[in-house]
Image (cartoon, grey):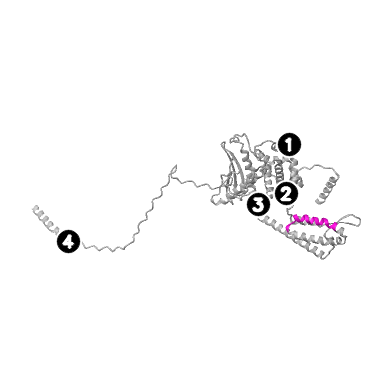
Amino acid sequence: MKTCFHRLAFFLCASAFPAVAQEADPSPAPEPAPPVAIPVDEQPMPVAPDPAPQPVVPGGNVPQPQREERSLSRSGMFRVFGGGPEMRAQRGAVALLLEQTKDDFEELMVERADPSEQKPKNPNAFATPGTKLDDFRTPVDVVLVGKPGDAPLPKSVAYELDDTGHSFNLRIRIHLARGIDNELLQRMALTVLLYERALRDSKPGEFVEGKESLVVRPWLVEGLMEAQKWRSNTADRRLYEGVFKQGGGFTMDELFEISERNLAQLDSTSVLSFRALSGALVMALLEQPHGKGAFRSFCGEAARFSGEMPVLLRKHFPELNLSEKSLAKWWALTLAKLVQPKLTESLSIRETETMLNESLIFHTRDADGNAVNRGMDAWQAILELEEGERLEALKPANEGLVRLSYRCFPSYRPLLNEYQQILRDISQGKDKDIGKRVAELNEQRKVRLDRALRARDFMDFTEISQARELSGQFDDYMRLKKDLELRPRATRHDRVTDTLDRMEKTYDSRRER
């Protein structure tokens, strides 16, 4: 019974399944057509060209270091480094200055009698760096460090000498915090040039082991600087005139013994005196018979010599062996010659005024026959003299105006011509408007002098107001004043000293009241 019932149920389910399947799976609806595509202009992708083949260098294709910026002097002795590409002009200027210093130094020691050492016809002609104008053996590296505005160093320019045992290295370091001091750089260049000459006969390793030492005396460097100034007509003769009138200030032994440290401690007046005396000594040596050749050999040994300097000088200058004071005599004669002014050396306005007043003096005699000097205001008295006496009285004034015309301040030459015309009229007995002309000349002289003083005051004000640093001259004066107060004075017992001491005590006691 159950089996029949199961069969019937199975049959009913099987008959009903197709109908259900037909209703659940109807035919699918048609899909909508896709939208029409918008045409786009397709550009072809750029194809990069194949890179050029790179050469393979030893060590592989690695970035190469940038080329170091440097400037080379004309002779190739000075190589200036540092500063980058923007400092190219500065490096070139330093190289030119150092090369010019070297040329001037060599020119001082050229004997003109030797045609093989004649200077080239065109000294400014360009020479390739490989051309050696001097047989130097050790080049000099000049390094520029720092930049304007940096904290300044105690020494803006310094030199270095290294002995590696295999070679010598000479360097000049220039700090650019305060710019470049050309005069200081020239001194350093001369020092290095003297070192280089001394190293030509030396072997590397001697200074490392302490066998020798190099020392360049300051008097030699300062003397070379002054000798170059005199050769280029840029020296100040008044400096030598002041030293000559004051009697120097340094003996020859003191001049030889002063070191760089002692020189830096001197006051400004002593430094100027030291420079003038050093310049006179170097020029005295150069003026010796065959002095330039002897001085060249002396410079090659000066930095290496550790004994007494007069011994080395007598070795290279045999003429100095005539007597113990031969060098001192040559030194004094050279200083006296440097003091003499040149005929074409112009005077200042104040100096011209002084000499003009001294020239316009009439030499006459009084009733007793005594000599009497009269100024330009006494022209009427001269006019009343006899012709012979007038000419005799006016002769010194005429000669003085002629001498002054060579050296007077340029703007005074028209005034001198007018004075000469007045003297000519007085000698001829003419008195037409002489008083008026003399008064006009006095007024013009006063205007010139006032303008000169005003220009001097303005320049002093400009220098003081725009100064970046103190010169130290006032400090030198105060230091000298203190030294004089502390320095013991010799006790004197003459009548004048006793009287002055008694008056000083009396004055001090009254002032305290």
- Choose the circle earlier in sequence order: 1 or 3: 1
Near mark 1 (Cα within 10 A), the count class, few <14, some 14-19 or many ≥20, is some
Q: Quadrant of residue 223?
A: top right
Mark 1 lies on a secondary structure that is helix
| Residue depicted at x 67% and y 55% | 463
Tell me the CA gap for discs 1 and 4. Answer: 146 Å
| Image mark for residue 321 | 1
**Relative image position of residue 242 (x, y in whole percent):** 75, 48
Mark 2 lies on a secondary structure that is helix
- Choose the circle earlier in sequence order: 1 or 4: 4
| Image mark for residue 469 | 3
Q: Nearer the viewer, mark 1 or mark 4?
A: 1
**Relative image position of residue 216 (x, y in whole percent):** 65, 40
Q: Amino acid at mark 3?
A: Glu
- Choose the circle earlier in sequence order: 2 or 4: 4
| Image mark for residue 23 | 4
Q: Amino acid at mark 2?
A: Leu
- Choose the circle earlier in sequence order: 2 or 1: 2
Q: Nearer the viewer, mark 4 or mark 3?
A: 3
Near mark 4 (Cα within 10 A), the count class, few <14, some 14-19 or many ≥20, is few
Q: Amino acid at mark 1?
A: Asn
Tell me the CA gap for discs 1 and 3. Answer: 48 Å
Mark 3 lies on a secondary structure that is loop
| Residue depicted at x 12% and y 55% | 10
* Residue identifier under label 2: 239
Q: Are marks 1 and 4 in contact (CB under 8 Å)?
A: no
In this view of the protein, which residue sits in the foreground, 199 or 129?
129
